[in-house]
């Protein structure tokens, strides 16, 4: 799996009254990582949507291993681990320094404007296959 890294700095608003990141924010970071991963491959969500193609979340999970705190820099490794006819599975690993704090995945189904599944666009499939061949 080709991996891409991006970073986020924990903002105060992302923490709870115990000073740790509120659990739901990890899914926001997944989205940031996924968007940046696709952008690094020359694919943008907005261009897909302009073409009438959407990526709906079908599944999302996160396994928490340690806490992130205000002002920590979180490094997110992301990549595509599976591609099917109409869906892709992304995997994420989150680190503060060398310490893994969480891991997760999300499955996205490609749909049209009517929310009906469509095939993964050829452009995305071709880029994914080319990246896999380089690994």
Image (cartoon, rainbow, N blue to C red):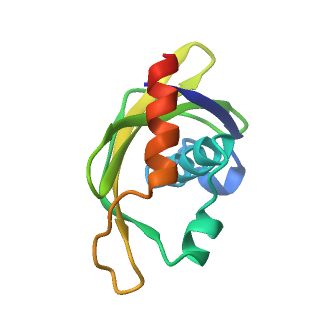
Q: Residue furthest top?
A: 98
In the image, 61 versus 17, the foreground residue is 61
Identified at 66% across, 57% down, the residue is 13
Which quarter shows the N terminus? Answer: top left
Tell me residue 39's x, y (percent): 66, 48
Reply above or below: 71 against 108: above
Identified at 61% across, 36% down, the residue is 69
Classify residue 104 by image quadrant: top left
In the image, 92 versus 40, the foreground residue is 40
Tell me residue 16's x, y (percent): 54, 52
In the image, 117 versus 99, the foreground residue is 117
Identified at 39% across, 32% down, the residue is 103
User: Does residue 6 appear in the picture of this structure?
Assistant: yes
User: Does residue 93 appear in the picture of this structure?
Assistant: no
Tell me residue 100's x, y (percent): 47, 21
Q: Is residue 54 left or right of residue 37?
A: left
Query: Number of labelled discs?
Result: 0
Identified at 70% across, 51% down, the residue is 12
Reply above or below: 93 against 114: above
Tell me residue 63's x, y (percent): 32, 36
In the image, 20 versus 86, the foreground residue is 86
Reply above or below: 15 against 117: above
């Amino acid at each position: 799996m080709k991996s891409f890294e991006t970073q986020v700095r924990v903002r105060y608003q992302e923490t709870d009254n115990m000073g740790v990141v509120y659990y739901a924010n990890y899914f926001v970071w997944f989205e940031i990582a996924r968007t940046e991963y696709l952008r690094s491959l020359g694919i943008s969500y907005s261009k897909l949507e302009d073409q009438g193609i959407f990526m709906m979340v079908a599944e999302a999970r996160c396994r928490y291993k340690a806490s992130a705190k205000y002002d920590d820099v979180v490094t997110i490794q992301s990549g595509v681990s599976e591609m099917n006819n109409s869906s892709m599975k992304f995997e994420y690993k989150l680190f503060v320094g060398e310490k893994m704090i969480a891991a997760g995945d999300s499955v996205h189904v490609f749909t049209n404007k009517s929310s009906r599944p469509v095939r993964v666009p050829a452009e995305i499939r071709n880029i994914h296959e080319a990246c896999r061949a380089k690994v």
